[in-house]
């Protein structure tokens, strides 16, 4: 398979060799690397990526869930281009900022007031800062293996066990397994005086699309209230699941919500929002307000593309993506059933993950039982047949995908998995 990959992608190989001279690993984003080398993509249109060797791929990764309407969407591109011609960033408010804040406040149940920033990383960083300032407490609880961006407080857990962090970071974080509210209650019962917030993705995304067990999020809400800590939902990935994100889907309202990805329409973005009394701390007309900088916060191009994206993402489009996802899930499951391969799929709406495990993982540690070699083999086999997913098995759909794309992907998964069967005997 690796040989086929190399034969199909000689230009990507050349580019990788050059890139490696100037960027460690030839890239600037860890998740873009995979062995033997990542593809260099020349162009992306609709549901497709085209590499510099002219190979076409159906994009089932969509920049880790952010390109919810696929690539180079005509209407979104038009809005972004219009913004480009009006000057892209000034240190003043713009009509788009007002329009988009109103749109998101009306759309996401927990968000009564909002602030824009430039990434999901900043969104979680500011949400944590807001929670600490509001509660006057200095620690948070987060879930092991949950991805909340790259800043120190977000990153500190078992996943980053090779990094050395500034002194005392670890003292500000309590880590619990996802789907385990008992551990959280234990931590809270001992340390609530010290804890500002519980930070959680309603569905764990990067960690492997792990859904919350029945009642888990509700329990977190109740624990947060009981122990007087804030509940922060990181909806950077899950906002695509319903009009108002996972909080609407599961009927649990956090105090603060972090967003990014789809709300930027393909441009760098982040936002955080929530209860008025918390967000009003950022009001610079008040004495002792909480400062919030960011040269490109809420810039015109990002917000124009973001508004267009969110206006297009109506319930019909969400349901169409969800039903195509169920179709793909069923096709893969059918292939798996006919084989001896230990594969499980986890899926919520238009997001799913393939795991080489016997049982569905319920937290990050359980995803680590997945056979890494097998997922690497599957990934390359899929690429060789024109299906682009995350190297670690994350799959998600865009609204421009068709039944035909699902048929093609289902057939490719079948071929690839069937080829792998002898490896498992
Ligand atoms: N939170 C979650 C749940 C994410 O998936 C990501 C990005 N994958 C982030 C935060 C960080 O967002 P960004 O890459 O925009 O900093």
Image (spheres, grey):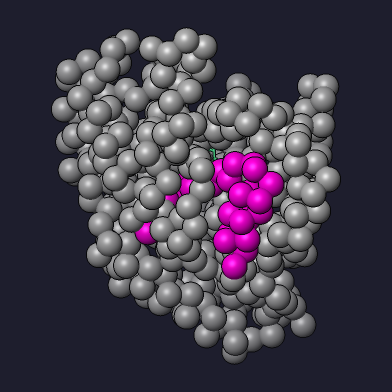
Quadrant the C terminus occupies: bottom right
Residue 77, image x and y in percent?
22, 37
Relative placement, left or right, of 264 versus 357 is left
Q: State whether residue 423 is above or below residue 3.
A: below
Residue at point 38% right, 68% down? 322
* Quarter of the image with the N terminus in it: bottom right
Q: Quadrant of residue 81?
A: top left
Q: Where is residue 297 in the image (x, y as percent from the top left)?
A: 39, 22
The region drawn magenta spans 215-242
Say which residue appears at 32% left-offset and 22% top-offset. 299
Nearer to me, 164 or 175:
175
Would you say residue 133 sits in the magenta stretch?
no
The residue under the point 41% across, 19% down is 283
For the question of whether residue 379 can be seen, the reply is no
Hey, which residue is sitting farthest bottom in the picture? 338
- Work out whether residue 166 or residue 84 is closer to the camera in this orientation and state it: 166
Which quadrant of the structure image shows residue 363?
bottom right
Residue 341 occupies quadrant: bottom right
Q: How many labels does the image show?
A: 0
Say if 288 sits above or below 194 in the image.
above
User: Residue 324: percent from the left, percent from the top?
Assistant: 36, 71
Give above or below for 294 relative to 50: above
Q: Residue, x 42% and y 34% (percent of image)?
A: 276
Residue 216 in the image: state x and y as whole percent. 62, 63
Q: 291 left or right of 142?
A: left
């Amino acid at each position: 398979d690796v040989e086929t990959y190399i034969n199909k992608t000689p230009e990507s190989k050349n580019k990788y060799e050059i890139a490696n001279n100037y960027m460690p690993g030839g890239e600037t984003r860890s998740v873009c690397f995979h062995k033997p080398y990542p593809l260099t993509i020349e162009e992306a249109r609709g549901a497709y990526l085209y590499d510099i060797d002219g190979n076409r791929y159906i994009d089932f990764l969509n920049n880790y869930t952010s390109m919810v309407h696929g690539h180079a969407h005509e209407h979104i591109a038009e809005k972004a281009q219009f913004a480009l011609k009006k000057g892209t960033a000034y240190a003043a408010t713009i009509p788009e900022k007002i329009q988009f804040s109103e749109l998101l406040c009306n759309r996401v149940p927990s968000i009564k007031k909002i602030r824009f920033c430039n990434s999901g990383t900043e969104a979680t960083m500011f949400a944590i800062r807001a929670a600490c300032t509001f509660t006057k407490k200095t620690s948070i609880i987060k879930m092991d293996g949950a991805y909340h961006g790259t800043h120190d407080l977000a990153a500190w857990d078992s996943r980053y066990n090779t990094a050395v962090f500034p002194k005392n970071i670890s003292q500000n974080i309590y880590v619990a397994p996802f789907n385990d509210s008992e551990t959280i209650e234990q931590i809270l019962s001992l340390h609530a005086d010290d804890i500002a917030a519980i930070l959680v993705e309603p569905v764990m995304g990067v960690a492997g699309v792990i859904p919350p067990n029945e009642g888990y999020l509700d329990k977190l809400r109740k624990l947060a209230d009981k122990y007087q800590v804030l509940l922060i939902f990181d909806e950077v990935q899950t906002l695509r699941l319903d009009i108002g994100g996972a909080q609407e889907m599961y009927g649990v309202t956090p105090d603060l919500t972090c967003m990014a990805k789809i709300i930027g329409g393909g441009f760098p973005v982040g936002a955080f929002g929530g209860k008025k009394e918390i967000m009003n701390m950022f009001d610079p007309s008040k004495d002792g307000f909480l400062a919030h900088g960011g040269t490109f916060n809420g810039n015109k191009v990002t917000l124009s593309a973001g508004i267009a994206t969110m206006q297009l993402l109506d319930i019909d489009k969400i349901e169409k993506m969800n039903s195509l996802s169920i179709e793909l899930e069923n096709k893969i499951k059918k292939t798996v059933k006919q084989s001896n391969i230990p594969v499980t799929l986890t899926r919520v709406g238009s997001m799913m993950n393939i795991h080489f495990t016997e049982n569905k993982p319920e937290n990050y540690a359980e995803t680590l039982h997945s056979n890494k070699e097998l997922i690497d083999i599957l990934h390359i086999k899929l690429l060789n047949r024109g299906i682009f997913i995350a190297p670690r098995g994350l799959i998600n759909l865009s609204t421009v995908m068709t039944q035909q794309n699902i048929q093609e992907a289902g057939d490719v998964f079948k071929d690839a998995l069937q080829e792998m069967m002898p490896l498992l005997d």
